[in-house]
Amino acid sequence: MSSIQCINAAKTFNATLRIVLDMFEKKAKQEVDIANIDRLKKRIALVKSQYSEAILCDLALEVFIIYKDHILVKNEDFFLKLDIKAECARRGLETSSEIFPLIEFMKAFYCTAKPMEKELMWEKTKQLYESSLEYRIGKQLV
């Protein structure tokens, strides 16, 4: 049961991540942004193919655990000021470098988003957190 839980959680995480990236891609207006999103998608696919489908889910959890309170209350000010790369380095967290540009895209998107888009982004961020947590719980039961 727990290995199925891990597989399903990783699938949910990856599906949610695709939705987020597609959302950014649809909103992107400049060629450089579209190219950067495409490059990020390819890098994510490469990392998953080299390690596992669950690698980003597993690595992202450490970041989500630390900042879950800010995510759950939708702390906009904290999110916009967060330097995730510096925070991970400061805390000695092992995480995927793919997370850094993703968060920067999220910040840029958020700054120009309409209220409904912002709410959707918080919802998807919460889903990413929940699926990575579900993955970790399943992993501990294996």
Image (cartoon, grey):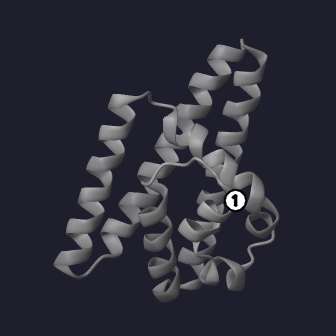
Give coordinates of residue 53: x percent, y percent: 45, 30
Q: Residue at x 60, y 82 (%)?
A: 80
Q: Residue at x 62, y 32 (%)?
A: 9
- Of 88 and 54, the residue lying toward us: 88
- Relative to 103, does residue 99 appear above or below in the rendering? above
Give coordinates of residue 32: x percent, y percent: 20, 76
Number of other residues with Cα within 10 Å of mark 1, as a class: few under 14, some 14 to 19, many 20 or more = few
- Of 55 and 3, the residue lying toward us: 55
Quarter of the figure that contains the C terminus = top right
Give coordinates of residue 93: x percent, y percent: 64, 51
Quarter of the figure that contains the N terminus = top right
- Relative side of 61 to 55, left or right: right
- Relative to 41, does residue 109 appear above or below in the rendering? below
Number of callouts in the render?
A: 1
Give coordinates of residue 14: x percent, y percent: 48, 41
- Relative side of 91 to 109, left or right: right
Q: Quadrant of residue 29?
A: bottom left
Q: Quadrant of residue 30?
A: bottom left
Q: Residue at x 65, y 77 (%)?
A: 79
At label 1, the amino acid type is Arg
As helix, strand or loop, the secondary structure at mark 1 comes to helix
Pick out the residue farthest to the left: 31
Q: Which residue is drawn at 69% across and 81% down?
A: 76
- Of 21 and 104, the residue lying toward us: 104
- Relative side of 85 to 41, left or right: right
Q: Please name the residue that numbered disc 1 is placed on.
A: 91
